[in-house]
Structure formats: C-alpha cells, structure tokens
Amino acid sequence: MAHHIKPVKTEKKAPATSSSYSFGKKNYQLMIIGLVIITLGFVLMSGSEDIFSTTKMTIAPIVVVFGFAFEVYAILKKSDSNA
C-alpha cells in the first residue's frame, strides 16, 4: 500500500502597492529643520572668544533645547497617509 502525499499549494500574495512608512515627507522636512536649529545653537555656542557672553551662556543653550524639542515634535507628528 503506497501512500501518496499531495503537495500543498501556497498562494503568493501580490506586493502591496501602498507604502506604509512610519514617517511622511512632512516629518522628514520638520526633522531637517530641527537639525538646522540644533546646529545653529552649537554654532552660537562656539562663537566669540568671550566664554561668559550672554550668547554662549543663555541664548545658545535655549536654541539647542528648542531644536531638540522641535525634533521630538517632528517625530511624534502624525504623518498624512494620503500625501
């Protein structure tokens, strides 16, 4: 008595046509803006020779922190799926 095993047919799924990325174009644009703000803050921090200037001690760190906060916003912003 011979037992015949039938091959299992598998259905191949067509690749999805709609892309489902985590971030949209707007998110990437906002992230680039945030990086520019952070870079600007570090440039302000490295400015003149006076290490106790108001720019280096107060303004530049505030700009850097604002840049990081902007990055968090850019990451958490819901992307438009229809864009």
Image (cartoon, rainbow, N blue to C red):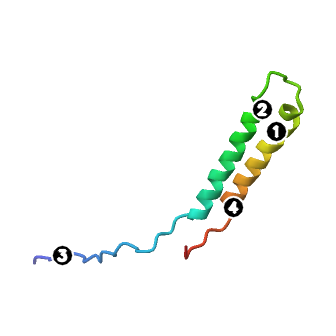
Secondary element at image label 2: helix
Q: CA gap, disc 2 to disc 1?
A: 7 Å
Image quadrant in which you'd find residue 4: bottom left
Image coordinates of residue 38 in percent, x first then y, are 71, 43
Image coordinates of residue 22 in percent, x first then y, are 56, 63
- Disc 4 marks which residue? 76
Secondary element at image label 4: helix
- Disc 1 marks which residue? 61
- Disc 3 marks which residue? 5
Q: Residue at position x 72%, y 41% from top?
A: 40
Is residue 23 among what the camera can see?
no
What's the amino acid at mark 2?
Met
Contact (CB < 8 A) between labels 2 and 1? Answer: yes
The answer to which of marks 4 and 2 sits earlier in the sequence is: 2
What's the amino acid at mark 1?
Pro
- Disc 2 marks which residue? 45
Image quadrant in which you'd find residue 65: top right
Quarter holding the C terminus is bottom right
> Residue 18, labelled with which disc?
none
Nearest-to-viewer mark from 4 and 2: 2
Image coordinates of residue 36 in percent, x first then y, are 67, 46
Q: CA gap, disc 4 to disc 3?
A: 53 Å
User: Is 44 displayed left or right of 6 in the figure?
Assistant: right
The answer to which of marks 3 and 1 sits earlier in the sequence is: 3
The image shows a total of numbered marks equal to 4
Quarter holding the N terminus is bottom left
What's the amino acid at mark 3?
Ile
